[in-house]
Structure formats: C-alpha cells, structure tokens
Image (tube, rainbow, N blue to C red):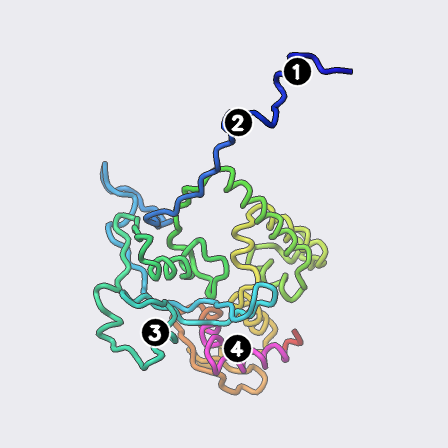
Amino acid sequence: MAKATSELASTPTQTQSSSSFKRQPARKAKAAPSVYIFKLIQEHPKYYEGASIFPPRFTVPNKDTVLFNYGTEEEPDFRPRQIRYLDGYPTIYVDEQEKNGPISATIVNGQRNIITFENGHLMCPAWNKTLYEFLISCNQCEQQTNKAKAVKNAYKMLDFSGRDVNIVELGKKKDMAYDMARNASLEDMIPHAKYLGISFVHPSTGVERDYDAIREDYKSKALQDPENFLLFANNPRIKTLYLIEQGLKKGVITTKLVKGQLHWAGSKQLISVIDSSKKETEAIADFASTDEGESFIKTLRVQLSL
C-alpha cells in the first residue's frame, strides 16, 4: 500500500542536504579544575559573632607513611612507603627524592614545604601536582581509602561534581562494601568487625555470638556507611591491634611486669621498651610496625594460633 503524501514528504531523501537535519550537540568534556580546594573537617565553636568555625591556621606535616601498591589492581601488594612534600621536587616518594643521596635538613624543613590551612581551607593550584598528590595520599585525608594508620581524618577535598555522579559512586561503594563483607575470611572480618564496634557477645546473656550472626551485622555496617567500611577494610594496623589485644587478653604478652616494657608473659622475656605515655595497644602497635617488631607479630600470631 502506498504511503500517504504527508508521510512521504516527511521522509528524508538522498537528494536532501545533510545540513537540513538537526544534529545532537556533542557532549562537552568535563573541564579539569584550575584549583583543588581542601577543607578541615573538625569545626570549632565560635568565640564571638563573626568568628571563623575553624582555627586561623592549621599545619599538616609534610611527611607521612602510606600504603603503596607495588603490585597490580588484580594482584595488589600493599606495603609501607614514605612520602614527603618538597616544593620544587617532581615526586612525593622519599626513595625517589633521595636516589642521588640524602637531602639536607635545611631543605626538608624549609618554609616553602610547610602545608598550612588558612581559616579551615587550603587552595592547591592544579599545576602543583606534587602538593595535590601528597594531600590526597596522606592518612589524614578523608579521600584516602587505604590508610596505613588508623588516624582521624583531618581534612577532605571538596567535591563539586554533579549530584547524579555522586549517587552512582555511592551505589558502587555500597556494592563493593557488601561484596567484601559477604566474602571476607574470618581472619579479615573479625578485626574489622571489632573495630567497627560490632558486639561479639549477647548484651543480655554475655554468651559469645556465632560468626554467622556477626557477619550479618558486618554486612549491615557495609550498607549503612560504605565509605567508612571500605576505609578501614584490610587495614594492617587494625589487624595488628587485634592481635595485640588478643595477646594481652589471653595472657601471651604483658606490660604489667615493668612500666614501659613489653614482655612474653610465660618466660618473662623482654620484647621491647614501649612508650608508656600512649595507650598500651597503640604503643605496642607502633613497635610492631618497625623491622624488629615484624618478627614479634609473627611469633605472636603463632602463639595465638591465628
């Protein structure tokens, strides 16, 4: 059956100019920011009307130890690596900065290397790639999701991207956190669950809960706050703290014999001197992060049969 005249008239022909059709405008690429803005997280009470909710000046140390992936995304190999911000240097990694020999203290402690938040904010020009990389890599940065230390977030980079993008990212984080919670081994789950505040005993009876029930709470935590869940998942410091807590609880190690010293409880053999001004588990964990402490943790794990 022949098409109606009006329908034929609306059908494009080969003789019609391509310029007579409207083209969909090309989507513009998202412009890179000219400056990155970092903001302190902890607000302070106002002492008078018009005062800032942040301290006038807040300084971030220009060196840190982070977890660096020496492997690949498929086979990660996270190990500690020192970073340091030195103005004018093309890298933040200390081993690369010192490939030709140690750098003098005069340069390291120079005024240009002081990282300061003014009234709670720090503006990092996009061209200063090493400062940006240092700030985003530090353990005190909220965006650093693979921390080497269980430290409190001091600052975050402000995100001005589209709201829909943020919603999608949150959804991805929830999926990732839930999968991790569902598939984590007991060795990985138990220290992390304890750190997240999940109870291992029934509050009314004091009876220990079974691991299946703990895992259900663990999965709920992953969905409630996926960013915080992922932030401390598989964190070596948290695993070390758990081992130490178990060692103290089960009487394998002790700090009770001599103040400021850690001993094997059975043999009373000195393991190390520790900082008595800190919480004992944190002081022991600091020792455990050293080369000498590595063998201590291996022995403790064997003693605990973990």
Label 2 element class? loop
- Whether pointer 1 and pointer 3 mark residues with C-beta atoms closer than 8 Å, the reply is no
Looking at the image, is 234 positioned above or below residue 160? below
- Calculate the distance from the C-alpha at mark 2 to the C-alpha at mark 4: 87 Å
Q: Mark 1, mark 2: which one is toward the viewer?
A: 2
Real-space Cα distance between discs 1 and 4?
Answer: 90 Å
Taking the spot 63% from the left edge, 56% from the top edge, the residue there is 180
Label 3: element kind? helix
Q: CA distance from mark 1 to mark 2?
A: 19 Å
Mark 1 vs 2, N-terminal side:
1
Marking on residue 254 = 4
Q: Which residue is mark 1?
A: 7
Q: Between marks 1 and 3, how big is the CA–CA gap?
A: 72 Å
Q: Which is nearer the N-term, disc 1 or disc 4?
A: 1
Q: Amino acid at mark 2?
A: Ser
Q: Callout 3 environment at 10 Å: few (<14), some (14 to 19), or many (20+)?
A: some
Q: What crowding class fits label 1: few (fewer than 14 Cα within 10 Å), some (14-19), or many (20 or more)? A: few
Q: Quadrant of residue 251?
A: bottom right
Q: Nearer the viewer, mark 2 or mark 4?
A: 2
Can you say whether 88 is above or below 206 in the image?
below
Residue furthest out toward the top: 5
- Residue highlighted by disc 2: 17
The residue that label 3 is drawn on is 97
Does residue 290 belong to the magenta stretch? yes
Q: Position of residue 74 (x, y in %)?
A: 61, 64
Q: Which residues are magenta?
A: 284-303
Relative to the observer, which residue lies in front, 243 or 148?
148
